[in-house]
Image (tube, rainbow, N blue to C red):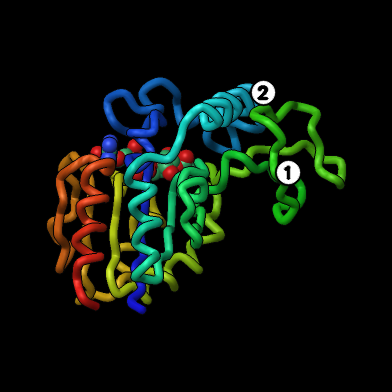
Amino acid sequence: MKKIVVLTGAGISAESGIRTFRDSDGLWEEYRIEDVATFEAWLRNPALVQDFYNQRRKQLYEVEPNAAHYALVELEKKFEVQIITQNVDDLHERAGSANVLHLHGELKKSRSTIDPYLVYDIKGWELKMGDKCEKGSQLRPHIVWFGEEVPMIVPAAKLSAMAGIFIVIGTSLNVYPAAGLIHEAPYSGTKYLVDPNDCRVSHIPNLTFIKEKAGSGVPKLVEKLMAKSC
Ligand code: OAD
């Protein structure tokens, strides 16, 4: 069975109603990364950081996967599919994708501030100051903040290197190391990119750019791949 690796970013969840980060109406237009998405921000004003992620989590309970998430599940009928997502939402899982690797953490989880291996499911949308891990330290959002290490990048790079087909959906490819994964995919392998806006990918060999929103572009691409003999 041919292996397909799919790298997704905020754009795949945009049509579900989750804001991207760097588009004109993106989250980083309203908030400063330095205030809500760094460890220094957490040390300075943990309540503000908690509130930012609580709002994101609350919204996650109000949205649903869209046609792009569901189309990727369809692909599993014919291919071995590995999703590598930069998104902290759970829309791939809720659509039914079997193999999802989260590079930047998961909104619905918390982790200990003294032991990174202590990770918990958050019950409901709110993580509060005073919520503690079993070792007694404050719980923080299970999110990879700017400047922090990305523990899942090593397995993600290994998986990318095994891709027969590499698909990129809805990411500005601005944030490393995630943006570098496309270079881990086999040089001569087939690659697709789905995004309604121009992307900095002209230098990538064997890449087909589908300049469409994920909700329409991904189902079309999936239909094409399903129709091909492999
Ligand atoms: P960005 O906001 O940087 O990029 C979103 C991409 O989605 C852009 O290329 C848009 O053109 C595209 N897009 C917008 N609407 C779309 C749609 N309907 N269908 C398909 N594509 C669409 O988001 P990411 O690249 O995911 O990290 O950002 C990477 C990381 O930066 C995030 O994981 C987050 C952020 O800061 C952390 O918070 C650690």
Q: Residues within 10 Å of mark 2 (few under 14, many from 20)?
A: some
Earlier along the polypeptide chain: callout 1 or callout 2? 2
Classify mark 1: residues with Cα within 10 Å, few (<14), some (14-19) or many (20+): some
- Specify whether residue 77 is in view: yes
Of residues 157 and 11, the one drawn nearer to the viewer in this rendering: 11
- Residue 36 makes an appearance in the image: no
Q: Locate residue 98 relative to residue 12 in the image: left or right.
A: right
Read off the residue under disc 1. 113
Q: Quadrant of residue 229?
A: bottom left
Closer to the camera, 81 or 174? 81
Picture quadrant where residue 162 is located: bottom left
Q: Amino acid at mark 2?
A: Ala
Please tell me whether mark 2 sits on a helix, a strand or a loop: helix
Q: Where 104 falls versus 230 (above or below)? A: above
* Residue 66 image point, x, y percent: 37, 40
Image point 60% across, 27% down: which residue?
A: 54
